[in-house]
Image (spheres, rainbow, N blue to C red):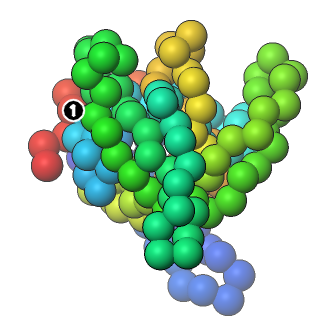
Amino acid sequence: MAPVRYSLHVKGKPRHPLARVGWREWASFPNLGVEAIKAKVDTGARTSALHAVDTKAFERDAQTWVRFGVVARGHSEATAVPTEAALLEWREVRSSNGVVQRRPVIVTTLYLGDGAWSVELTLTDRSLMGFQLLLGRQALRNKVVVDPARSFLLGRTPPDL
């Protein structure tokens, strides 16, 4: 069965199709070395969050960067994939339990199904959460339609890169 596509009219712009996604999907961030990561699609969350370990800020060419590890699917923190990204900013984020945390924010390309677009990710410890990646509504806006009753509408296995 072919995926259902929806159209969205954005004021002053032509209509374009939107992919339908479930409340959890496979995603990837190849430029961070993350080939497959299970994402929770959460329209109740404003920002997106990626589980990062050993996050450290450093200077490179008069710009602040962050070095961190991303735990690969099914592995321990000892086998985290080391990566680096330019720091966009530090942002205060209120977690689901009400605690405000100052987090580094990076911009990277999200691959979800057949689509790819730039997203902002906050880096935080999600080791106690069920998903290493939370995709919030800012990352999803004008890109997908979420069906909260379904899962893995873009495929039940990790994407092939």
Count of labels in the image: 1
| Image coords of residue 158 (percent x, y) | 21, 32
Q: Is residue 155 visible?
A: no
Name the quadrant containing residue 96. Answer: top right
| Image coords of residue 15 (percent x, y) | 53, 77
Q: Is the residue 158 above or below the residue 161 in the image?
A: above
Left or right, 96 with reference to 3: right
Q: Residues within 10 Å of mark 1 (few under 14, many from 20)?
A: some
Q: Is residue 15 visible?
A: yes
Q: Residue sitting at 23 percent across and 41 percent down?
A: 35
Q: Which residue is mark 1?
A: 158
Residue extending farthest to the bottom is 12
Identify residue type, mark 1: Pro
Along the viewing direction, whichever of 130 and 22 lies nearer the viewer: 130
| Image coords of residue 129 (percent x, y) | 56, 15
Q: Residue sitting at 36 percent across and 17 percent down?
A: 77
Q: Report helix, strand or loop for mark 1.
A: loop
Along the viewing direction, whichever of 28 and 159 lies nearer the viewer: 28
Left or right, 96 with reference to 131: right
Q: Identify the image quadrant of the N terminus.
A: top left
Q: Residue sitting at 71 percent across and 82 percent down?
A: 11
Along the viewing direction, whichever of 93 and 68 lies nearer the viewer: 68
